[in-house]
Image (tube, rainbow, N blue to C red):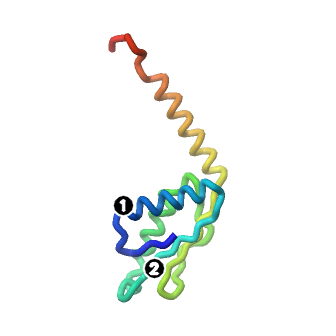
């Protein structure tokens, strides 16, 4: 998945959802930040985006290769994490069960 340092919030969210989907299917994902022109002078911007992607998908994957500069690109590899996926699934089920018990029954007054 390719990102740019000046990516907008909507594009970031869309691409990150795709990364999450690929990891959920059991695939590894190579995340690339492409720098153009003077952007290469600010690798901290690319590192921040890669850290945000890793933090957003930590419930389905883990960082296999830490971000590193490769010419005009910064690259990171994410791998699926079955244990994290199982923990996330259990947490969602517990939240759903809790929400089901807290909803008022029809016909009862609160």
Vertical comparison of 101 with 95: above or below? above
Q: Is residue 88 above or below residue 50?
A: above
User: What residue is rendered at 40% in x and 18% in y?
Assistant: 104
Q: Position of residue 82 (x, y in %)?
A: 66, 52
Relative vertical location of residue 22 with respect to residue 34 in this rendering, above or below: above
- Circle 2 sits on which residue? 34
Percent of width and height locating residue 100: 48, 25
Could you say which quadrant of the image residue 102 lies in?
top left
Circles 1 and 2 in contact, beta carbons < 8 Å: no
Q: Secondary structure at mark 1?
A: helix
The structure residue drawn at horizontal position 47% and vertical position 86%, both measured from the top left corner, is 72
* Quarter of the image where the C terminus is located: top left
Q: Residue 38 appears at what percent x and percent y?
A: 35, 88
Q: Residues within 10 Å of mark 1 (few under 14, many from 20)?
A: few
Local SS, label 2: strand
Instruction: Estimate the spatial distance between the alpha carbons at disc 1 and disc 2, rounded to whole Å.
Output: 18 Å
Q: Residue at x 43, y 69 (%)?
A: 49
Q: Quadrant of residue 90?
A: top right
Mark 1, residue position: 10
Q: N-terminal of the two: label 1 or label 2?
A: 1
Q: Residue at x 63, y 45 (%)?
A: 86
Q: Position of residue 43 (x, y in %)?
A: 42, 80
Number of on-image labels = 2
Say which quarter of the image contains residue 44.
Answer: bottom left
Q: Residues within 10 Å of mark 2 (few under 14, many from 20)?
A: some
């Amino acid at each position: 998945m390719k990102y740019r340092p000046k990516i907008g919030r909507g594009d970031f969210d869309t691409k990150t959802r795709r990364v999450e989907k690929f990891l959920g299917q059991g695939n590894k994902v190579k995340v690339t930040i492409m720098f153009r022109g003077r952007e290469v002078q600010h690798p901290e911007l690319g590192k921040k985006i890669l850290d945000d992607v890793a933090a957003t998908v930590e419930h389905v994957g883990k960082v296999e290769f830490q971000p590193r500069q490769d010419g005009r690109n910064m690259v990171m590899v994410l791998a699926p994490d079955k244990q994290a996926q199982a923990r996330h699934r259990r947490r969602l089920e517990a939240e759903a069960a809790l929400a089901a018990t807290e909803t008022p029954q029809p016909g009862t007054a609160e």
